[in-house]
Amino acid sequence: MPPFYIRDAGASSHAQDAQFIVDAFDSAIPHLTAAGSAGQWGSEPLSRNPNFHTVIRDALLQSEKFRDTGLGEERVRVFVAEVEVDSTVDGPSAATLDDNLESENSPEAVDRLQLARRLHQESGKTFLSVGAAKLRDDSFANHVLYPDNLRTHTDAATKAGSFVFLDFLVADHRVLGERRKGAGGALIDRVKQYAMQHGKRTIWVDCWAGGSGRLVQYYQDMGFTLVEKFEVPRRDSTMWQGNLFRMDVA
């Protein structure tokens, strides 16, 4: 497992971050579909919804503002996980594609090989973005505020404050598994670090409850405790099954 470098995402300081996060979400769709978990985010690339680009871009703008001023319409932070790569070996034509995706010679693969690289000017090192996470400071995502059976938990947490909500956690499945493996755990560690640095007592997260249950087990392995199962309606009138977790850090 390579060492991960976690940095703040940016809309102005790191102009490619918004596109990287959109691409990372898209890269997860065929992976989830192949694993029988299309019910998590659907089977269509999220980038086909033009509003998704706007949502990600706005999140980065809000993250920069909150980081720099402590103010903002939304108190959020977005982080990116990177690994160091050798630019002489890992150029755009390098075989960094995940085996679960298209053949390297296909047009889709050529496009996917344009991965998010960053040259650190002072050190001359090249870094490859492999994952991202977004947290909310003292607020929940809207979809966990609606289920009646969650209100006892969310109302109490909102009243008490001193918590963060892990809004999303995504890895770039265009990158070989050996490079991205562990990125989620490294990002969760950064969220824990943020929580402790800012005097937070609890980290909350929700996840899809369907499929093989691997995602549920993942968060439990990361130290989260299952609080409650819930349902929220989808646009097609079916129900999205979820689990709400918490981790106490103080």
Image (cartoon, rainbow, N blue to C red):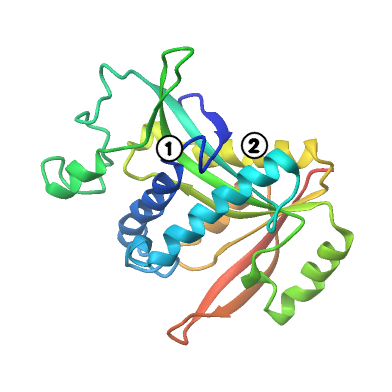
**Residue 218 % position (x, y):** 55, 50
Residue at (83% x, 51% y) in the render: 162
If the image is split into quadrants, where does the C terminus sit?
top right
Label tally: 2
Q: What residue type is labelled 1?
A: Val
Q: Earlier in the sequence, mark 1 or mark 2?
A: 1
**Above or below, comparing residue 202 to residue 140 in the picture:** above
**Above or below, comparing residue 38 to residue 72 in the picture:** below
**Residue 41 % position (x, y):** 43, 66
Q: Which mark is residue 190?
A: 2
What secondary structure is found at the residue carrying circle 1?
Answer: strand
Measured Cα–Cα span from mark 1 to mark 2: 15 Å
Figure quadrant of residue 179: top left
**Residue 194 % position (x, y):** 72, 39
Can I make out residue 222 in this image?
A: no
Q: Kindly give the residue lying farthest to the top in the view shown.
A: 123
Q: Which amino acid does label 2 sit on?
A: Arg
**Above or below, comparing residue 179 to residue 37 in the picture:** above
Residue at (19% x, 30% y) in the render: 93
**Residue 132 % position (x, y):** 51, 44
Residue at (38% x, 69% y) in the render: 42
**Above or below, comparing residue 97 to residue 38 in the picture:** above
Q: Which mark is residue 183?
A: none
Mark 1 highlights which residue? 130
Q: Kindly give the residue lying farthest to the left in the view shown.
A: 105
Front residue of this view, candidates 1 and 77: 77
